[in-house]
Image (cartoon, rainbow, N blue to C red):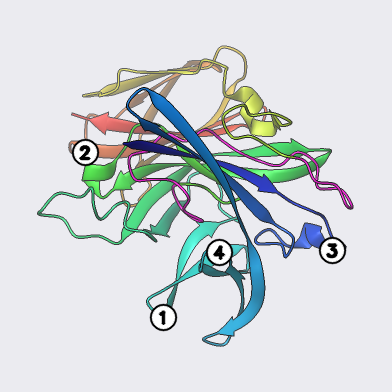
Amino acid sequence: MKKVIVLTLLVIAASGMEAQKWAHSSSIWKIQEVWFFGSEMFTDFYNISIEKDTVVLGETCKKLSNGFVTFERNDTVFALYNDTFRSVMYFNAQVGDTVAIFDYVGKVRWRITSDESADTVWAVISKVDSIDVENKYLKKFFFDIFSPTSVRWEGAHSYSENMGGGFIFPYFYYDFMYEQPGFGTCDYGDSTIQDFWVYNNLCTRTIGISENSELNISIYPNPAHSQINIASPYFDIATVGFYSLHGQRKNIGIDNNNSKESQIDISSFPAGVYFLHLKLSNGAQYVHKIMKE
């Protein structure tokens, strides 16, 4: 039997809500379960809400109705695990930051190979978008996993202010679901509740940096042996940075044919994984994973 879970978040606004970015008292995560038995499909619904405020290990926390205990401090979200608070989301992250995400429910641990041991996902923030919710903006953070090596899934995962992320926390999805569409809220004005269905992406539109995600920036070849070519069809390339897997900036030779094309020399670096940081003249920032042969 195969089971799928769909997530919706309902939010009612209260005064001062804008300052809080996580686990509002009125938040409700609405889950639609869909499972298959043979050719038949079955559905069910249940809600996860904020059950109460509680103090744990000296921290004022929110207890969710499914038993999760969580709190936010200085734009970092923590979850209680085995009597220890572990960081699971960062709402102050910037493009290019390396973040440590605790593997709250063991989604990583069950996938790692026998010669690896890890309870933390290491990832780099590749993009920061904004979700327009009735002219109120929620940040959405995309990240690419680079460690443990056996769980470096292709493509970016994400989490959002107020809503979290299925891969990270809260965790509502079964382990076989690796690619989960984005989700958000519609309107959380006073006394207003709007449903937002995950798979349909209703009621939201993406703004800000994400508008530049379709600019078809070319970075080739990848993997590369000695040279990487960069082409930006619409905006000038303002800065180029090259970093090791551990965040060490590397000195690179840059040959600019013009403001929209560059070539960088990586021939002196050992083989491995690197990250290319780009900033364009319109302010957009990108991080691309480069494999050096």
Residue 187 relative to residue 242: left or right: right
Which residue is labeled 4 in the image? 77
Residue in the image at 26% along x and 31% along y: 291
Sequence-wise first label, 3 or 4: 3
Mark 2: which secondary structure? strand
Do residues under tags 3 and 4 come within 8 Å of each other at their CB atoms?
Answer: no
Q: Residue 272 — which label?
A: 2
Residue in the image at 88% along x and 52% along y: 191
CA distance for labels 2 and 1: 38 Å
CA distance for labels 1 and 4: 16 Å
Q: Quadrant of the N terminus?
A: top left
Sequence-wise first label, 1 or 3: 3
Q: Residue 178 — which label?
A: none
The region drawn magenta spans 167-194
Q: Amino acid at mark 3?
A: Gly
Q: Residue 218: x, y in percent?
A: 44, 16
Sequence-wise first label, 1 or 4: 4
Q: Is residue 206 above or below residue 185?
A: above
Q: Is residue 67 above or below residue 118?
A: below
Q: Residues within 10 Å of mark 4 (few under 14, many from 20)?
A: many
